[in-house]
Image: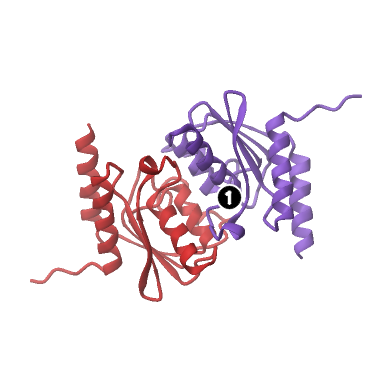
Chain colours: A purple, B red
């Protein structure tokens, strides 16, 4: 039997999440894809950067905007290992990200299918297409292992 | 008759909002106060910075974290001229800002008393004290004037 192969951007996001854990940061990784290629990537870094906004998604979005020379990331995909929080979902709206792919859902901190449900608000100016679940077991294992090691 | 004088941090945030408009950015200004002094300030700059996350609040929070050398801004106040959006409200939570003061409410983009109501979600990890309304007429005038000039 041959297992399904994860799309390359999610494989890369998961590798970044592993780097994040090794660096002592919550293991979340994100990449931005444009025209079929990864143009920006990041893992969580609020502690290393001394920046409470330095979630993987925010850093990847900021780098992608720099690369494309625009504060609008139309035609871009964001691949991330965890359901984005309210801050990151808001940033996805401001950046006009076309498609969002995330691995594990996050009942505690997520704001896509939980809590603030940012994209479902009637005022929400932009609605990315959202796909979730690919790679969720691996993404969830990384998080559980990280927090178990901290207790 | 003597009018009430706006607290200094909000006066400064409004001055920053005026600078924002002069720079062609949506007129919103923010300052972070720690131990009675302004330690960081910013106005909106997504276009100038080519950064969709460069709202006044995010920039001010990032600068304050740099100044204090910590990704937690406990004992800090954030003063901003407009009700924060979901992205900025999320950042306020991550930064553990103690008190939030905002001038104008924003039924279209706000996520404190409108829409995503980030702080009201049961999962929300941190609840700043929130005060609003001081300076709202001036803050609203700046925004209306800016958008009138763009039509």
The residue sitting at the left extreme is B1
Is residue B28 shown to the viewer in this render? yes
Could you tell me residue B117's position as x and y percent?
Answer: 46, 51
Which residue reaches farthest right? A1
Residue position for label 1:
A55
Up the image or down, B62 lies above or below A119; here it is below
- Residue at 79 percent across and 61 percent down: it is A149
Label tally: 1
Q: Is residue B68 left or right of residue B26?
A: right
Residue A116: x, y in percent?
Answer: 53, 47
Badge 1: chain ID: A
Determine whether the residue tagged by mark 1 lies in a helix, strand or loop. Answer: loop
Q: Neighbour class for label 1 at 10 Å: few (<14), some, many (≥20)?
A: many
Residue nearer the viewer, A56 or B111: A56
Identified at 61% across, 24% down, the residue is A36
Q: Nearer the viewer, residue B95 or B85?
A: B95
Q: Is residue B15 left or right of residue B112?
A: left
Name the residue at 35% across, 73% down. B37
In which quadrant will I find the C terminus of chain B? top left
Q: What residue appears at the point 75 percent right and 46 percent down from the top-left corner? A: A140
Residue A87 position, x and y percent, is 51, 48
Residue A82 visible within the image: no
Of A140 and B26, nearer the camera is B26
Quadrant (top left/top right/bottom left/bottom right) for the N terminus of chain B: bottom left
A73 relative to B92, above or below: above
- The percent position of residue A107, horizontal first and vertical second, equals 65, 48
């Amino acid at each position: 039997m041959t297992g399904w192969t994860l799309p390359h951007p999610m494989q890369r996001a998961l590798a970044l999440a592993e780097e994040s854990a090794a660096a002592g940061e919550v293991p979340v990784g994100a990449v931005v894809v444009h025209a079929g290629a990864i143009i920006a990537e990041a893992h969580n870094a609020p502690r290393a950067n001394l920046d409470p906004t330095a979630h993987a998604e925010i850093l990847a979005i900021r780098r992608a905007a720099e690369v494309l020379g625009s504060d609008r990331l139309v035609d871009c995909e964001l691949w991330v290992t965890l359901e984005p929080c309210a801050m990151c979902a808001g940033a996805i709206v401001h950046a006009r990200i076309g498609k969002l792919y995330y691995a594990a859902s996050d009942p505690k901190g997520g704001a896509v299918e939980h809590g603030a449900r940012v994209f479902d608000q009637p005022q929400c100016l932009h609605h990315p297409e959202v796909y979730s679940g690919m790679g969720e077991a691996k993404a969830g294992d990384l998080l559980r292992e990280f927090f178990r090691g901290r207790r």
